[in-house]
Structures are given as C-alpha cells and as structure tokens.
Image (cartoon, rainbow, N blue to C red):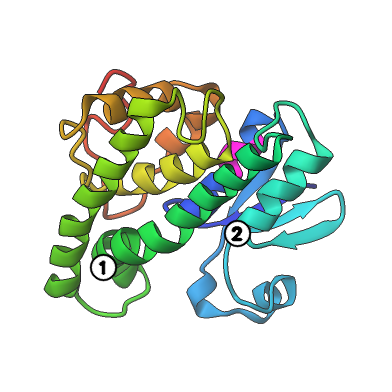
Amino acid sequence: MNRLYHVPLSPFCRKVRLTLAEKKIEVELVEERYWEQSPDFLRRNPAGKVPVLRLDGRLLSESQAICEYLDETHPHPQLLPRDPEMRYEVRRLCIWFDDKFHNEVTSKLLYERVNKKLTKEGYPDSKNVKSGAARIKYHLDYLAWLLDQRRWLAGDVMTLADFAAAAHLSSLDYISDVDWNRHAVVKTWYATIKSRPSFRTLLSDQVPGFPPPQHYADLDF
C-alpha cells in the first residue's frame, strides 16, 4: 500500500499531499512523530525528517525531490513546465518558500506556537514570534508584487510554486497568523487554490489542542 508518513501542519508534507491529490494518486496518510526518532522511522529515512513517501515499493524523501519525481512519473497535470525559464522560476520560488519563508516565518510562528508544545520542548520564544509576525508582511508584499504581474506565482499556469506557497500559508492560517486583508490579490489567489478538490484533506486536518479558526475551512473566508 502507498503511504505518506507526515505531520498534518508540516508545509513540506502539505506540498507533497497537494501534489499527490492533484495527480489523483491515492495514499494512506500515516502521522509520524518524527521527533521521537524511532528506529523504524530512521530506517525509512536516516535524515529523520518528514515527509517520507512509500510509493510502488520505493521509499522517497525530501519534499521537493518527491514532488519532482511525481511530476516526472505522473505527468498529468503538469506542475513543472517544460520551458527551461519557467521551470527555473518554479524551482526558484519553491526554494524561496521552503528556505527563506520557512526560516523567517514558518519556523518562527508555527514551530514556536505549535511544534514546541507537541514535542514538549518548552514555551514559545516571544522574540521569535515577534520576528515571524513582522517578516510575514514582507513576504505577503512580495506575493502581491508577483501576482500583480502574473496570473499565478510563476506565470500564467498553476505550478508547484503555488503549492509550495499555499502549503506554508495554509499551515499558518490554521493558527490565524496570516493577514488576508493586507493584499486583495493574495487573498483571491489563495481562495482559488483553497477551493480546489486537492485542498480538501488539508482543510479537514485537526491538531489536538489547537482548534483551527472558523474561517480556515471556509472557501469564501
């Protein structure tokens, strides 16, 4: 059986889940307490990170590598354009969110507010939370700048770049850390992605002790 070992609010896992759902690849979702570093999990991925995808007998790790593998082996719908320049732009934006946005925002807000409690690492660091709350404004402004020039983040078609961004923002939206009123164009873009069938399982996620806000699963906010 195909399985995705994941954590519900992990943006990296969510990016893979969106890709799988868009390509209509059915998998069993298995929550993995990766921080416990169990021997079974470390055998699946010695790096000790999620997501890990078991697909057709293969074990795949690292979200970007998994998504690109899925796009090559299941090319419809295509999430990485064939044009080299557009392909570069998609990859650049994926790295932007999985590296820069993750380090400056996701790790400062989601990890401090939620992950520390789940992993019993203590209380949120208020300096980190304040830093993340300030930096997300810069990133929302950048998203608005991109969307003022393009229909989607990387160009005129939806790509993996949109899923990478939506994965991070949806995780933060679960804890009400996104100001959707800052830019109407960003809110409209997210509402469009949020309304896709592939997003439904994400919107049904529930983390014990952290109920989502009422607007989280509302397709019209």
Residue bearing mark 1: 112
Is 203 placed left or right of 116 in the picture?
right
Viewer-side residue, 181 vs 194: 181
Instruction: Determine the residue located farthest toward the right in the rendered image.
Output: 57
Pinpoint residue 95: horizontal percent, then vertical percent.
Answer: 51, 56
Residue 161 lies, with reference to residue 155, above or below; the image says below
| Residue plotted at (24% across, 79% down) | 122
Residue type (three-letter) at the residue carrying disc 2:
Pro
Which residue is located at x 86 percent, y 49 percent? 56
22 versus 209 height, above or below: above
Query: In screen coordinates, is 219 left or right of 138?
Result: right
What is the chief secondary structure element of the magenta stretch? Answer: helix
Disc 1 residue crowd, few under 14, some 14–19, many 20+, Cα 10 Å = many
Q: Which mark is residue 41?
A: none
Instruction: Give the residue at mark 2.
Output: 51
**Kind of residue at badge 1:** Glu
Q: Would residue 193 appear left or right of 147 to someone viewing this image?
A: right
Instruction: State the extent of the magenta-drawn residues as a range.
Output: 16-20
Which of marks 1 and 2 precedes in the sequence? Answer: 2
Q: Position of residue 138 (x, y in %)?
A: 23, 50
Q: Residue at x 39, y 62 (%)?
A: 100
Location of residue 104 in the rendering, given as x and y in whole percent from the top left corner: 30, 64
Q: Residue furthest top?
A: 220
- 31, above or below 185, in the image: below
Residue at mark 2 to residue at mark 1: CA–CA distance: 20 Å
At numbered mark 1, what does the secondary structure look like: helix, strand or loop? helix
Label 2 secondary element: loop
Q: Residues within 10 Å of mark 2 (few under 14, many from 20)?
A: many
Q: Is residue 171 magenta?
A: no
Q: Position of residue 194 (x, y in %)?
A: 41, 27
Residue 190 appears in the figure: no
